[in-house]
Image (spheres, coloured by chain):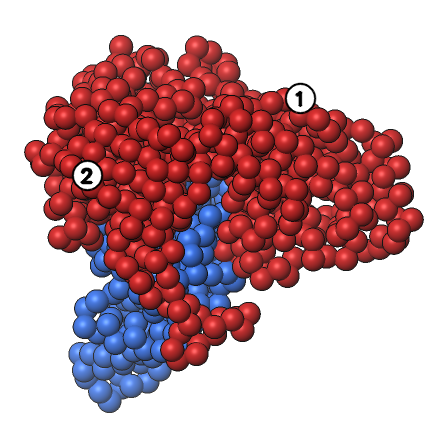
Chain colours: A blue, B red
């Protein structure tokens, strides 16, 4: 389970995406020579939004197919060792369209989807209700985690990069290595035990409404691994940029050290970090399943996991569809931010 | 290093701030008891609630004719008396003055209508088969071949509902407080069934819109829902005491909040941290430590859950005399005591029969039960005898569903078999429970399969009939014994519970010779509770008796 939901090797993903952006950016730069930048940005955004349509259909189709292909009859499994009569089972199958061929099931789902009906769970609850309760909680948790990892990660990474080779840098590297190598659930159980059980500072499990204050501990756990990556990314990027020509120029111009660091070094160093954070929004939304399990948070991860186990196609697909949209939008946002952060694009204006 | 310290200090401050805000809920000292549960798989209709998550809620908000005591006996709730001269026609009279929490009186019709609703095939209720021994059940559950001729995967024509009647002719309302039940055959211990939640009464309002009722059920039990939004899906359900309840389960607390937990690990931490009062299952990770974590507040004793594995009769080497020898050899090749001790840390009890020690009529000294003892020499000898009939080749496997906690013990069992008999033995995981049931139903297993049974009601019959009777609903592996069937029918037809028990004991002795299932162990009731509650007792069905719990 953990392996499935664990994000792929972040560094490779980030590097790949940075390369991709270079290509996109170069293309944009070429257009910029004879076209208005505002028009270009709009065209680019529009194109990216249009790309969501095939992505949406492709993703929902694939996911629906995968849930459909899960081995076993979900209706029989609902009753465990004591199945009701065959007629009862077939009636329930008919109620959820499970007796129809795959393509008919999918089209019925998509048809209802566009009428705003996402289907019902086996407990008779509408999927949109389930989403309305699960998504805000996970979003709250993910945003809190994102804020933690961005703030602390960039802060620690910046200091470490500026003091490369010093004690602080070495400690930051060791701590981040530890966080990366220790599985999230270990960190989760340890923090839960120390702060929830031993010290009693926080609730061991989050209550139903999942208010922000109860989510702080889970968010720290969720943020831990990404925090470590951000420390390392920022550190490497900062120390690279410290030796860059434009920094030497800025320093030579007589700018103060704080100004050089914040405006010239940090700003340029944030490009890969922002890319990483963009990718991470998606992973945090989905990858929270382990953390949600430890703290009994009724969020997206747990709901999707349960729905997969029960073979509830409509629930799984609806959730994944929303996640796909979040992923695509987050990536678009990153691309737009990227253009705003990268000085070379600005100079081309 | 200094800056790391600052970063950590600032998170600590946030956490403290968070704690101050969340403190209000943890310090709650009202007499509302919190316990663990899981989101009901179906809406809360008694005849459609078949799993534990919904079951513990339905049992709390409804009161049937009888309820089960801690020991598994029955005590009258709404029933004044349940009597019969011939164990076939039963006269049920009700106490006066019972009402549902909407003030509607509980009458004979409340029961008869609810049971008819549960049995009617077009209502597709999961517990419909509980009514299958009432006269007229075959009419309300009748089906016919699908007119389109559609077939299932196995090529059988699908069945569609075709009820010949809307109500069962065996149920007759005599007056407001009396009704009669005619059974299709004699059944001396029929009243034992009636404590199960499927036999709950329903108010008239339920039949107007069953779907809406299932979201906000109105019952007559010790507890009722605390308002319209008491069931917060996937989160918890809040129950408060029902002031109109006048049965034997009068709550000694102010209410019950059942919090849905995705894992028992989280629940265990919550009890440790004082965020939950009672947890009715100890997670595997805590098996080694629960006695020191909760020295005075845990329970660990056998429950009405029987676990075993079956060898299908349709496989080569596993039928006839050869199969009988091999089953006995397998059974004696397994060191149950060591596995329950090492793998389960003593939270399972080695099996000595096919039922459970908490059931009336259980015996640990059935004739032939020595086949359940670890006896490697005898096992090897029997296996060799079977090999003389037809030599065994290939790998022996036991199928299990990997989405449940089975891998560890299946591996231990196959290793025990492997080491004793010297054959190649492995566990065979199925990704989901659904997938494993499919292969059992289609009779396409390649080896053994894990099996288990959680009793619906505390009766020997319920452990035997659905699993081993020829053609029974859960007899997937195809066991059939005329001798066993006759004894079971004899037990059901006996006019006293003692006579019935004697027949069931004999029937089990037949099973010990044939071993259609190889008994392994009984699952224990295990649970822990915090020191802010007292009087925590667990019922025969491993569910805490919530009404008895008090806040210190």
User: Could you tell me residue A15's position as x and y percent?
Assistant: 47, 64
Which residue: 19% across, 39% down?
B174
The image quarter containing residue B271 is: top left
Q: Tell me the residue that label 1 is attached to.
A: B365
Q: Residue furthest bottom?
A: A34
Would residue B328 be seen by someone viewing this image from the given angle? Answer: yes
Q: Residues within 10 Å of mark 1 (few under 14, many from 20)?
A: few
Q: Judge left or right: residue B480 versus residue A325.
A: right
Residue located at (30% from left, 55% from top) = B120
Q: Read off the residue under disc 2.
A: B174
- Residue under the image location 32 percent in, 22 percent down: B75
- First-in-chain label (1 vs 2): 2
Residue A61 appears in the figure = no
Quarter of the image with the C terminus of chain A in it: bottom left
Q: Position of residue A72 (x, y in %)?
A: 50, 60
| Disc 2 packing (10 Å; few <14; some 14–19; many ≥20) | some
Q: Is residue A101 left or right of residue B444?
A: left
Horizontal side of B373 relative to B429 (left or right) equals right
Q: Secondary structure at mark 2?
A: strand
For mark 2, name the chain: B
Up-down: is A228 above or below B62? below
Vertical placement of residue B539 versus B422, above or below? above
* Labels 1 and 2 touching (C-beta < 8 A): no
Q: Nearer the viewer, mark 1 or mark 2?
A: 2
Residue at (20, 53) in percent of width and height: B211
């Amino acid at each position: 389970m953990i392996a499935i939901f664990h994000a792929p090797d972040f560094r490779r993903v980030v590097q790949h995406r940075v390369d991709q952006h270079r290509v996109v950016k170069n293309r944009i730069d070429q257009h910029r020579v004879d076209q208005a930048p505002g028009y270009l940005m709009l065209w680019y955004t529009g194109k990216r939004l249009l790309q969501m349509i095939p992505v949406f259909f492709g993703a929902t189709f694939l996911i629906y197919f995968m849930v459909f292909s899960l081995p076993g009859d979900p209706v029989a499994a609902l009753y465990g060792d004591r199945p009701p009569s065959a007629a009862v089972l077939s009636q329930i199958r008919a109620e959820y369209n499970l007796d129809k061929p795959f393509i008919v099931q999918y089209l019925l789902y998509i048809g209802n989807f566009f009428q705003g009906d996402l289907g019902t769970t086996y407990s008779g609850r509408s999927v949109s209700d389930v989403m309305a309760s699960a998504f805000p909680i996970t979003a709250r948790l993910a945003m809190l985690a994102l804020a933690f990892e961005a703030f602390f990660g960039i802060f620690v990474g910046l200091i470490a990069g500026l003091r490369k080779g010093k004690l602080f840098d070495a400690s930051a590297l060791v701590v981040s290595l530890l966080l990366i190598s220790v599985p999230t659930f270990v960190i989760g159980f340890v923090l839960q035990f120390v702060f929830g059980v031993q010290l009693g500072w926080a609730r061991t499990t989050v209550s139903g409404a999942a208010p922000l204050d109860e989510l702080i501990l889970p968010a720290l756990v969720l943020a831990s691994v990404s925090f470590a990556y951000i420390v390392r990314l920022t550190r490497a990027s900062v120390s690279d940029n410290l030796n860059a020509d434009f920094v030497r120029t800025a320093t030579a111009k007589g700018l103060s050290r704080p100004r050089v660091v914040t405006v010239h070094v940090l700003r340029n160093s944030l490009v890969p970090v922002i890319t990483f954070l963009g990718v991470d929004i998606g992973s945090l939304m989905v990858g929270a399943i382990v953390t949600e399990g430890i703290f009994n948070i009724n969020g997206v991860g747990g709901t999707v996991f349960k729905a997969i186990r029960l073979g509830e196609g409509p629930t799984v697909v609806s959730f994944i569809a929303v996640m796909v949209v979040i992923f695509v939008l987050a990536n678009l946002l990153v691309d737009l931010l990227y253009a705003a952060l990268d000085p070379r694009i600005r100079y081309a204006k | 290093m200094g800056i790391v310290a600052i970063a950590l200090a600032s998170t600590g401050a946030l956490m403290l701030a968070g704690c101050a805000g969340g403190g209000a809920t943890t310090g709650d000292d009202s007499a509302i008891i919190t316990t663990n549960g899981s989101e009901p798989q179906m809406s809360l209709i008694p005849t459609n609630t078949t799993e534990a998550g919904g079951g513990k809620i339905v049992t709390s908000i409804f009161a049937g004719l009888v309820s089960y005591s801690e020991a598994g006996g029955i005590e009258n709730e709404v029933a004044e008396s349940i009597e019969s001269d011939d164990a076939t026609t039963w006269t049920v009279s009700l106490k006066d003055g019972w009402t549902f929490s909407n003030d509607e009186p509980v009458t004979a019709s409340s029961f008869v209508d609810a049971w008819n609703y549960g049995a009617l095939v077009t209502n597709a209720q999961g517990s419909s088969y509980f009514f299958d021994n009432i006269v007229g059940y075959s009419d309300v559950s009748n089906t016919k071949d699908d007119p389109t001729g559609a077939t299932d995967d196995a090529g059988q024509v699908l069945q569609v509902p075709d009820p010949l009647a809307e109500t069962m002719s065996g149920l007759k309302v005599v007056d407001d407080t009396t009704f009669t039940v005619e059974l299709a055959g004699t059944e001396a211990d029929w009243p034992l069934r009636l404590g199960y939640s499927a036999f709950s009464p329903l108010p008239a309002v339920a039949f107007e819109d069953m779907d809406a009722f299932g979201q906000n059920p109105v019952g007559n039990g010790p507890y009722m829902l605390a308002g319209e939004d008491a069931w917060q899906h996937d989160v918890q359900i809040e129950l408060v005491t029902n002031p109109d309840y006048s049965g034997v389960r009068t709550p000694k607390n102010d209410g019950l909040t059942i919090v849905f937990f995705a894992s028992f690990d989280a629940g265990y931490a919550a009890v440790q941290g004082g965020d939950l009062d009672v947890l009715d299952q100890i997670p595997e990770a805590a098996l080694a430590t629960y006695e020191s974590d909760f020295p005075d507040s845990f329970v660990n004793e056998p429950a009405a859950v029987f676990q075993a594995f079956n060898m299908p009769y349709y496989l080569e080497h596993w039928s006839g005399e050869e199969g009988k020898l091999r089953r006995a050899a397998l059974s004696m090749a397994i060191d149950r005591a060591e596995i329950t001790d090492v793998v389960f840390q003593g939270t399972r009890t080695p099996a000595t029969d096919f039922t459970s020690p908490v059931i009336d009529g259980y015996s640990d000294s059935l004739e032939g039960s020595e086949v359940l003892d670890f006896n490697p020499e005898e096992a090897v000898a029997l296996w060799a005898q079977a090999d003389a009939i037809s030599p065994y080749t290939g790998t022996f496997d036991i199928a299990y569903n990997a989405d449940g906690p089975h891998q560890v013990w299946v591996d231990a069992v196959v290793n025990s078999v492997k080491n004793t008999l010297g054959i190649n033995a492995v566990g065979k995981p199925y990704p989901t429970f659904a997938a494993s049931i499919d292969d059992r139903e289609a009779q396409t297993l390649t080896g053994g399969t894990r099996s288990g049974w959680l009793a619906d009601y505390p009766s020997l019959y319920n452990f035997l009939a659905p699993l081993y009777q020829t053609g029974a609903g859960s007899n997937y592996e195809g066991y059939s014994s005329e001798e066993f069937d006759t004894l079971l029918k004899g037990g059901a037809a006996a006019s006293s519970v003692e006579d019935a028990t004697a027949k069931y004991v004999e029937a089990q002795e037949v099973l010990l010779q044939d071993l259609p299932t190889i008994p392994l162990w009984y699952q224990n009731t295990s649970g822990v509770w915090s020191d802010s509650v007292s009087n925590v007792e667990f019922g025969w069905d491993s569910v805490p008796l919530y009404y008895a719990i008090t806040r210190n």
